[in-house]
Amino acid sequence: MQTLIEQYQTAIRAAAESKTPLRIRGGGTKDFYGNPAGEQNSTLLDMSDYNGIVDYEPTELVITARAGTRLADLEAELDRHGQMLAFEPPHFGAAATLGGCVATGLSGPRRVAAGSVRDFVLGVRMLDGKGEDLRFGGQVMKNVAGYDVSRLMTGALGTLGVLLEVSLKVLPKPAIETTLCMAMHEAAAIEKMNQWAGKPLPVSATCFTEGQLFVRLSGAESAVRAARAKLGGEEVKDDAVFWRSVREHTHDFFQPDQRLWRLSVKSTAPSLHLPGKQLLEWNGALRWLCATGGDDAEVIRRAAQEAGGHATLFRGDAMRTAVFHPLPSALMKIHRALKEKFDPAGIFNPDRLYPGI
Amino acid sequence: MSAQELVNQMRSFLPPDAVLHETEDLKPYECDGLSAYRQLPMIVVLPQTEEQIVKVLQLCYATQTPVVARGAGTGLSGGALPHAQGVLLSLAKLKQIIAIDPLARTARVQPGVRNLAISEAAAPFGLYYAPDPSSQIACSIGGNVAENSGGVHCLKYGLTVHNILKLRVLTIEGECLEIGGDSLDSAGYDLLALMTGSEGMLGIVTEITVKLIPKPEKAQLVMAAFDDVQKAGSAVANVIGAGIIPAGMEMMDKITIHAVEEFLHAGYDLNAEAILLCESDGSVEEVADEIQRINAIMQQSGAINISTSHNEAERLKFWAGRKAAFPAAGRVSPDYYCMDGTIPRKRLADVLRGIEELSQEYGLRCMNVFHAGDGNLHPLILYDANKPGELERTEEFGGKILEMCIHAGGTITGEHGVGMEKINQMCSQFGSGELTMFHAVKAAFDPAGLLNPGKAVPELHRCAELGAMHVHRGEQKFADLPRF
C-alpha cells in the first residue's frame, strides 16, 4: 500500500509541475455530481486500488478504512457486528467508495436524526497539493487539537486534497425499525414532521411524496411500539426497500431524464411553489425538485435562499447552469485562499465545485 | 500606535466605560480559567453591538494591533490570555437571546449568552441545548464555539460542532461572513466545522444559531462497582458492544472514590477499584428497557455491587460524587494538576497502569476520572507546590501522561483546547507538515496574524514539553464552578 501512496505522490508532483489537472476518482458512481471538468487534458487519479479496512474495533465505535474501500464492503463488515454508518449514505452504484462518500459529503434519510457524514468523520489521512502525507483528527470521539481539517475535507469534492484514509464514528443498528404512512397535504406534513421532531420520539427518517407522509421509527421494541401508538397511520410493508429507493434515487419520483434539483432549506419553510414535482425528506429540510422542462435556475435559487438555504443542480445538464449555489464574495475569498493553501498549483478536480477552485 | 492614542480612537465610537486601560481595570482580564498564565492587555474593549465590533476590528487591522477575544473567561487552556501589545475584545456584553423558534427547534443568540441560559429559555417549549460543559452555568456560547466544548453527554448528543447551524463571523478586516445556514448544510466548504474549535484564531463570532432538541422524558442511572479496573473497562466495552449508547458513562478509580466519598458520602463502595456510572435517557419505555439491559451487562461483567437510581434525588446523589472529583482533589492535596487527554477506550487499562507506574516513579499520587464513553481521561496529579521541585516533577509527569495518550492512539486535548497551555505538546502530536497546514489555514482568514497570535498552533521552531491546569491551594479561578 505504501508503494501506491508513493505512486500517488509522484503523480501529484508531476501534475503540479506540469499544471495538469488530476481527476480524483474512486468507483466513479458520483461522476455526475458537480460541475463538468473545465479542462479536457486532465489525468485520472484512480483510488480504487487503495482499499481495505485498516482498523475496526466494534466496541470503540470507530472504523478506519482506505478511501478506495467499497462502501458496500464497509457496511457489510459493520453489519456483521450489528453496527452501521448512521448517516445512511447513498451509494448510487455498487462501486461506490468511502472516499467518494466523504468527498461528496452526501447523507441519506437517517441524517435527520443521526447527523450527516461530516458529523461522523473523526480523522483523515490525505495528500495535499505538494504530495505531503498528512494526518488530521484521529480515531477518538473527542479531539480539539488543531483546526478541524478532517471535516473541512468532507464535501470538498476532492478540491483540497486526495483522501487516503478516513476514520468514522459508527453506531449500533437499532433493535427494530418500522415505517408508518399517512395521507395529508404538504403543509400539514411539514408542520407534523417538525412538531414530532420537538418531542422525544424515535423518528429516524421522514419522507413526503404524492400526498403521503412516511415516518420511520427506530429503536428498542417497547419505544417503537409506544411511538407507533402515538403517531397512528398505516404500517408500510417492506419499508427497507422504500427507504433504499429514496436514498438511491430509484423511487419512481426520480426520473433519470429530468433535471433534479436538491434544495436544502429551513425545515419549517412553507411549501415552495416551483414548476415540477417535489419529494421532501429530513422533516422538510431537504426538498428534491424534479423539474419539468425550462426550469429557471435563478427562480429556484432565489426560492431556496428565501427559505433559508441553497439549491444544487443535483443531476442534469450542467453545461448551462452552475451546479452549486453561488457564494457571497466574502466567502468566496476564503474559499480561494484555502484552495491556494492546500492545492497551490490548482490541480485537484479544478472547477468541479466552483470556477477557479 | 500608543495605548493612549488607541484608547482615544476607540472612544470615538465606544462609550467611555467600554474602553479600559488603567491597570486596576485591566487586572480582572489578565487570565482566564487557567490562572497560572497571566498577562495584562494593553487595553480592554467591551462593545455592545456588532457595528461597534466591526469598528474595533477595522481600527486594529489598520494599526496592526493584535486582538484576543474573550467570552466568560472560564476556559482552561489560556485561550483568552491577553496579548501585552494587544486589545482584549470582551464579548460579554453581547448577551441577548435574539429569537427562539420552537417549531424549527433553533435559537439565535449572541456570543455572550451563557450556555445554560439557552436551555433555560428553551425549557418552556420542552427543548434544550445539548452540549453541557461542566462550567455551563457561567461559560458563554461564543467560548463554546471557540473551544468546541463537550460535556458528559457528548457520546450520545455530540459536541458543539454537532449542535450549531449558523454563525455570523467578522474577519479581522471587519468583513461579515455568514457561515452555515438555517438549512442542515450549506454550499461550499464546511467552514462551520473549521470555525468551531478554532480558538479565536480565524474570526470573531457575533451571532450563533444553535440546534435545540427535545428534553428526554426520563433519565435513570446505574452505578456499578468493580474490584478490578480492567473489568470496569470491559464493562464499558460490553455495554457499547450490546448496542447501547448511554447518555453518559463515567468512571472513577479507587483513589478518587475514596477522596469523594470521604467528602460527600455519595454511597460509593469503598472496596471498589473502579466505579462506573451509566446513565440512560429517552422515553419512559426506552429507559426501562435500557436500564434492565445495562444492569444485566454489569452483572455479567463481574460488578461486585450494582445500584440503580429509583428517583431523581437518588440519580443526582450518585452523580454528585463524580461531579465533586475536582474539589475533592483540592481537599486531599494542597495542589493538583489536571490533564485532558483522550485515548481509545480499549487502551484504558494500559494507560492507567502506565500512570500508576509513573506515579510511583515520581512519588506523586494521581486520581483518575474518565468520560468512559468517549475515552476522555482527566488525570489529576496531586502535589504540593511548596515542596521544592515538586511542581517541576509534576509537570514532567503530566507531560509523560500526554505522550502516553498520543502513543495509545489518542490526543493531548479532548475538550479543554490547546490555547497557551498545551502548545508545546502540539509538536508531539503533529508533524511539521500538519503544523504548516494549520498556519496556512489561519493565514487564509487572517494573513497578518492579528487574531489571538501565539496560541493553539506552535511555531515550528518551538518544541518542548509542558502541560495542563495548575491549581494552587484551591485558588482556582472560578473555584465555585463545577469542574468534571
Image: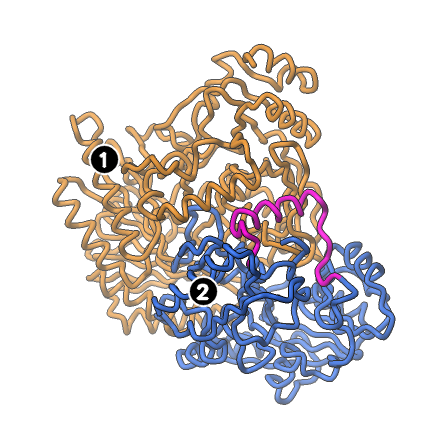
Q: B111 or A321: which is nearer to us?
A: A321
Q: Which mark is residue A169?
A: 2
Q: Amino acid at mark 1?
A: Ser
Closest to the observer: A170 or B243?
A170
Task: Determine which quarter of the picture holds residue A55.
Answer: bottom left
Q: Is residue B200 magenta?
A: no
Number of the front mark, 2 or 1: 2
What colour scheme governs how the chains and residues are painted in the rendered image of this protein? Answer: by chain
Element class at badge 1: loop
Chain painted orange? B
Q: Image quadrant for the C terminus of chain A?
A: bottom right
Please, what is the three-letter code of the amino acid marked with disc 2? Lys
- The alpha-carbon separation of the residues under discs 2 and 1 comes to 38 Å
| A325 drawn magenta | yes
- Quadrant placement of the N terminus of chain A: bottom left
- Residue at x-position 68% and y-position 42%: A330
Q: Which residue is mark 1?
A: B333
What is the span of residues highlighted in magenta in the rendered image? Answer: A322-347
Which residue sits furthest front?
A18
Image coords of residue B116 (percent x, y)? 55, 43
A343 vs B139: above or below: below
